Image (tube, rainbow, N blue to C red):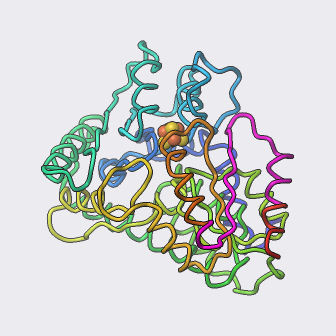
Amino acid sequence: MPSGEERPFRFALEVCRNPAGAVSRWKSVSGRKAAGCIPIYVPEEILHAAGMLPVTIWGNEFSPASSGGVPPFVCSVAGGIVSAIRSGKWEEIDAWVFPSTCDTIQNAFEVLFPPNDDRPRFPFVFPASADAPGAPEYMLDRVEAFREWAGTVSGREVSEGALERSVRVYNENRKVFALLEERMAETPGSFTGTELWAYARAGMVLPREGHTEILKKALSRSREVPGPTRAKVFLTGMLATGPVMEALDAAGAAIVGNDLALGNRHYSGSADESGDMSLSLVRRHLRRDPCSTLHESGRTRIERLIERFAWSGADRLLMLRVRQCEPESGDVPDMADECRGRGIPFLCLDIDLHAEERASARVRIEAFVEMGE
Ligand code: SF4
């Protein structure tokens, strides 16, 4: 039987292994609907306030039986999501939200979404740039339309009071996730890479209140560090996979910071808890940290990344690039130059969610951890 300290981790791991099972359980207990959210940046608070379960899907929840007719040039995140939907694997999902994350997501769903799938769909088109004229007004219009859509799909109107409560629930969750990240920076090795991965991923499926409780339990364990760490790594990119995190753990590396889309970028940034709630969600979106999938003319992603890297106390930067991800690929040369100029060891590791090259990832990570020892 797992000890009290291990229990939250085991539970999170189980959820990660069978996310569809977790959604199905939630639906049968609650009798309510689940909304599939394509990454990233869906304002989930609205779905929560409508009584729905937001489920963020990353494309590797199922092992693909076939490519499902998805062309090979599509990245494995979009490809995995579309082929799972096309092969009927997400029956638990009652409605879909497609944000305008990148060209791949937009094109893949326009062209490849099964035409006979009549579940409601909301295409959430973000303003092209946070500081473009009219961006707040446009985003407010989209948030209001999304609010109305969620109310219609769920049969429960999204009242201002319900949305205010949901904003608080999400802010609390983000606060506790930030504490986990802080602990990892302050005490390298206090949580393994695999634990961070499991806790971040479990939050994609679990109701936010339950996820917050799991994180709190995880944080309540003793601060004792299991052993010395060989490297302090900052992770950037879209997402980590279980095998990459296992390789980092096996190499004796501690994750001390991240700006992963399935990590810090998903969980950071609170919404204002007073005033008009739709506006609060608009402001939260428009003041996000720079990201390869959002455009703005202010501070660049690299500047912010280096700032966060320094804060974390990391001694090397690992970029996990999803193969064929154009937005992230665009950042890599500048990131590599910046690291070279600052003497920061840097590695860009390509990952394919459906063709995980465990052995080569392990060898490259081991060599990366040895650098500068
Ligand atoms: S991994 Fe990159 S290309 Fe693929 S869906 Fe995400 S942002 Fe788009």
**Picture quarter containing residue 90?**
top right
Tell me what residue is drawn at x 45 percent, y 39 percent: 38
- Nearer to the camera, 81 or 217: 81
- In this picture, residue 288 sits left or right of residue 180: left
The reply to whether residue 57 is in sight is no
Observer-nearest of 58 and 151: 58
Quick check: is 35 in the magenta stretch?
Answer: no
Q: Is residue 247 left or right of residue 32?
A: right
Split into 4 quadrants, where in the image is the C terminus? bottom right
Q: Residue 145 at x, y = what percent? A: 19, 40
Provide residue 120's location: percent of width, then percent of height. 34, 27
| Residue depicted at 25% across the width and 70% down the height | 273
Q: Residue at x 22, y 49 (%)?
A: 158
The residues colored magenta run 340-366
Q: Is residue 287 visible?
A: yes
Q: Does the magenta segment cover residue 359?
A: yes
- 344, 316: nearer the viewer: 344
- Residue 73 position, x and y percent, is 58, 25
How many tags in the picture?
Answer: 0
* The quarter of the displayed image where residue 156 is located: top left
The one nearer the camera, 80 or 46, is 80
Instruction: Please tell me whether residue 11 is drawn above or below residue 23 in the rendered image.
Output: below
Q: Position of residue 315 (x, y in %)?
A: 68, 75
- 275 shown above or below 137: below
**In the image, 312: left or right of 107?**
right
